[in-house]
C-alpha cells in the first residue's frame, strides 16, 4: 500500500528479536468470556474502546461492544486478579469511572498516537488508559 520506494515491511533484526522474546509464549485471540487463565499467566485486553463521541469506533464484528460488555470485562479482570493472573487493559480515557473505585486497578493515562482519522486535523496523540493489577 502507498508509494514507498523502500518499505520497511520486513525488518529482520526486529522480527528475530520478537521471535526470541516470544519463545514459550502462548498467544490466543478469543472472546474474553471464554478466557482460560491461571496463576502466573498474563493477559492483555484491547477491547473496542468506550466511545469518545457518537462517531467513535465500538465494534470489531457485527455486534456492538457496549457498556454491558465493558462492565463484564471489568468484572472478569477482578476475577482474574483473585486467581493470581496479571492483566493489562487499554481503553479510552472515558473508561476511568469503571476502574477508579477499586484498589485492584492501577490506572495510568498515556499518550497514544492516532494516525488514522477521516479529519487530518484530528490526528495525533490522545489520552488512553492503561489498567493493570500489578
Image (cartoon, helix red, strand yellow):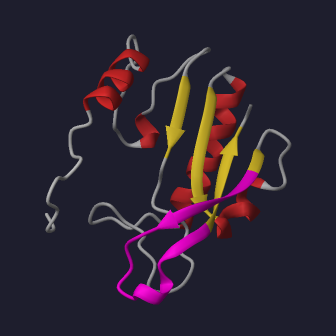
Residue at 63%, 48% (x, y): give it.
74
Q: Residue furthest top?
A: 24
Q: Quadrant of the C terminus?
A: top right
Residue at 80%, 38% (x, y): give it.
104
- Please tell me which residue lies in front, 46 or 35: 46
Q: Is residue 46 above or below residue 12?
A: below
- Please tell me which residue lies in front, 125 or 70: 125
Q: Position of residue 45 (x, y in %)?
A: 51, 44
Occupied quadrant, residue 61: bottom left
Q: Quadrant of the N terminus?
A: bottom left
Labels in figure, total: 0
Residue at 73%, 62% (x, y): give it.
96
Q: Position of residue 27 (x, y in %)?
A: 36, 27
Q: Is residue 117 above or below residue 60?
A: below
Q: Which residues are magenta?
A: 108-126
- Please tell me which residue lies in front, 116 or 79: 116
Question: Does residue 123 show up magenta in the picture?
Answer: yes
Is 92 left or right of 114, judged from the image as shown? Answer: right
Q: Is residue 14 above or below residue 76?
A: above
Amino acid at each position: 500500500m502507498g508509494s514507498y520506494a523502500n518499505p520497511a515491511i520486513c525488518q529482520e533484526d526486529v522480527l528475530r528479536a520478537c521471535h526470541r522474546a516470544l519463545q514459550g509464549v502462548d498467544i490466543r485471540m478469543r472472546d474474553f468470556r471464554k478466557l482460560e487463565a491461571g496463576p502466573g499467566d498474563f493477559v492483555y485486553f484491547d477491547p473496542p474502546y468506550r466511545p469518545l463521541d457518537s462517531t467513535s469506533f465500538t465494534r470489531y464484528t457485527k455486534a456492538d461492544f457496549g457498556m454491558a460488555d465493558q462492565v463484564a470485562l471489568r468484572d472478569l479482570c477482578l476475577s482474574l486478579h483473585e486467581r493470581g493472573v496479571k492483566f493489562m487493559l487499554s481503553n479510552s480515557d472515558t473508561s476511568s469511572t469503571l476502574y477508579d473505585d477499586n484498589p485492584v486497578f492501577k490506572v495510568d493515562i498515556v499518550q497514544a498516537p492516532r494516525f488514522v482519522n477521516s479529519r487530518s486535523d484530528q490526528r495525533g496523540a490522545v489520552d488512553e488508559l492503561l489498567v493493570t493489577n500489578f
